[in-house]
Image (cartoon, helix red, strand yellow):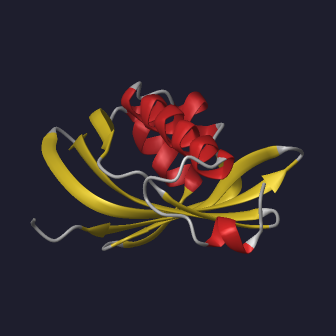
Amino acid sequence: MNDSPEAAAQEPGDDSADVLEFVDLAKEWAAAIVANDPARIARFMADEWVIVSESGIDPKEKFLSLVESGDLTHSAMDLRTRPRVRVHGDTALVTGRVTNTAHFRGERYDADEWTTDVYVKRDGRWLCVLSHITPAAPD
């Protein structure tokens, strides 16, 4: 990963190795979520992963148990923007806009959100430790 001043000045269209790596990672994680496969989803998360949303802070175990039970499913997860990537040693901040279609206990939810994921590099792999979602303002 590149911590040079040039890397810190990345633009949304930047094709640096850092940006491309996290674009691929985000696409793979989105595919795992749409597959509704808890084991596949968990491979992207550190043990201490939490998600922060309007309802508060939820741990990895709760999120994955909702997926495993079928109470939470996703049928779409699409990146609307190229993520903004900032790498600081073994920590990376990845922010982008995502739309998704989810069903929670049978009720459909369509979301347009800004997401920020915090990753740490462990044993040569990037693992997410925190995801924060914020509803996007209408265009």
Q: Residue farthest to the right?
A: 123
> Whole-percent x and y of residue 10?
55, 64
For the C terminus, the image quarter is bottom left
Q: Is residue 39 above or below residue 132?
A: above
* Res 104 visible: no
Please give the name of the residue rendered at 48% of the width and 30% of the height, measured from the top-left corner.
32
Write the residue at 81% across / 62% down.
90
The quadrant in which residue 136 appears is bottom left
Give the quadrant of residue 39: top right
How many dots with numbers? 0
Front in this rendered view, residue 23 or 4 = 4
Instruction: State left or right for residue 1 relative to residue 107.
Output: right
- Vertical order, 106 against 82 (above or below): above
Is residue 7 in sight in this rendering?
Answer: yes
Percent x, y of residue 129: 65, 61
Of residues 128 and 6, the one nearer the viewer is 6
At 71% from the left and 53% from the top, the residue drawn is: 47
Residue 22 in percent (x, y) is at: 59, 47
Q: Is residue 96 above or below residue 132?
A: above
Q: Position of residue 131 (x, y in %)?
A: 51, 62
